[in-house]
Image: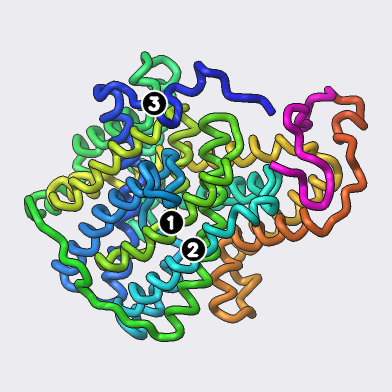
Amino acid sequence: MTEVTRHEVQYDVNEMPPWREAIPLGLQHVLVMVASNITIPIIIAGVVGATTGQTAFLVQVALLVAGLTTLLQTIGIGPIGARLPVVQGTSFGFLVIAIPLASEYGLSAVFGGAIVAGVVQVLLGFSLRWLRRLFPPLVSGIVVLVIGVGLLPAGANLAGGGVGAEDFGSWTNLGLAGLVLVAILIAFSFGRRLISMAAILVGLVVGYVAALAIGAVDVGQIADAGWFSFPRPLEFGLSFPAAAIIGMSVMAIATSVETIGDLAAITKGGAGREVTDRELSGGVIADGVGTAFASLFSAMPNTSYSQNVGVVAFTGVMSRHVVSVGAGFLILAGFLPKLAAVIAAMPSAVLGGAAIAMFAMVAAAGLKLIAESKLGRRDMLIIAVALGVGQAMAAVPALVAVFPDQLRVLLETGIVPAGVLAVALNVLLPDKDPVPVAAETGGHPDLGASTEGGTAPGATGGSD
């Protein structure tokens, strides 16, 4: 395994940068994730016909809870928390279950079901130490790759101006997205230390200023926002219909697969190493505790954010304390609606320019994990089948329209079928090709092979 050299890792997991660096680096994480974090409560508010005040409340608690659950991951409590630079936010995965539940039973059912889902994730997290052998680098890499590839259309939609935008794909939106991407590349390539590490923040600021200059920012929502508000727990209550318990519990398993991939991508992309049993278990447990906790404040289920995994891989800043600083900004925004409105007013196209680069970095981290396997014919077949089937279902949802709704929702993610197939095939397929393909064809003997702490051949894909 090729290790990330010391100069590539700007700050290690437990290192704290100077405050002059930690603050902009933490803010960078917030700006990358905030649009996704507030979009989900806005969608749910529209489904139930919430008032303007109720919508604002849902956005406020989404920011507050994201900050608190992020601290749960970065700082940790006992077995809870990966103690890695993991950013938590409201989960799009649960949205497909939450929308019909909210329509049929109200928001109380969504939050009641989410508490049960959180318990399911906690139980799964405590079991991961024994299930870890099912997720060698090959399997984890496939899951991470599918996550990154699956997110790219979302980045493209943001760059175009956001799904449903009247000016989608306009020169203005494409110009703003392109400006952000170019600014990121320039800052990363030619900027000094802090500027290079905060290249994403630089790009977003440049794009935001440009959008303000051409009148593309809705300043009205900033002016209308209040200065201080304290969120009330259990604002919408809790209820536990069977449909909510079953649906949310199933999605909890699917979300855990994505979290496993995110954790593997963070350590591989940021530090050039595999995720440990302790980090994997603590991360999934924190996901579950965060989801249950979020329900008490009427916030949607939480999960790790893949776009922030891309930030870690891009910058090489592995410091969990930097993400803790970002969590502080989220908590502050949760009490200061005016500040939240300033962040939320950032145009979709500006975020899209950064999102495309970040989502692609997640996919690249998946490729890096996959490259640790010997990549013989058996491994190539597993990659082909898992990636092909998973992406086919994600790209053409009509393929799985005949399945029951709960199962169809899971298949359409692409992540779940790819992950399940990768695990199953890695366990079931015999290893008949211990020699790397590159070696057989006369290629460089090191290509595609891992000679340092290599993955042991066999049905389980090796040991950690």
User: Main SS type for the magenta part?
Assistant: loop
Name the N-terminal-most of marks 2 and 1.
2
Q: Amino acid at mark 1?
A: Asp
Residue 329 inside the magenta-drawn segment = no
User: In the drawing, does residue 66 fall left or right of residue 288?
Assistant: left
Tell me what residue is drawn at x 76 percent, y 34 percent.
Answer: 454
Residue 290, x across and y down, in percent: 37, 58
In front of the other: 86 or 55 = 86
**Disc 3 element:** loop
User: In 3D space, how far apart are the residues under numbered discs 2 and 1 (Cα atoms)?
Assistant: 7 Å
Q: Are marks 2 and 1 in contact (CB under 8 Å)?
A: yes
Residue 453, x across and y down, in percent: 73, 31
> Which of the 4 quarters of the picture holds residue 46?
bottom left
Residue 15, numbered circle: 3
Q: Residue furthest front?
A: 78
Residue 287, numbered circle: 1
Q: Which residue is mark 2?
A: 121
**Disc 2 element:** helix
The range drawn in magenta is: 444-464
Residue 54, x across and y down, in percent: 18, 69
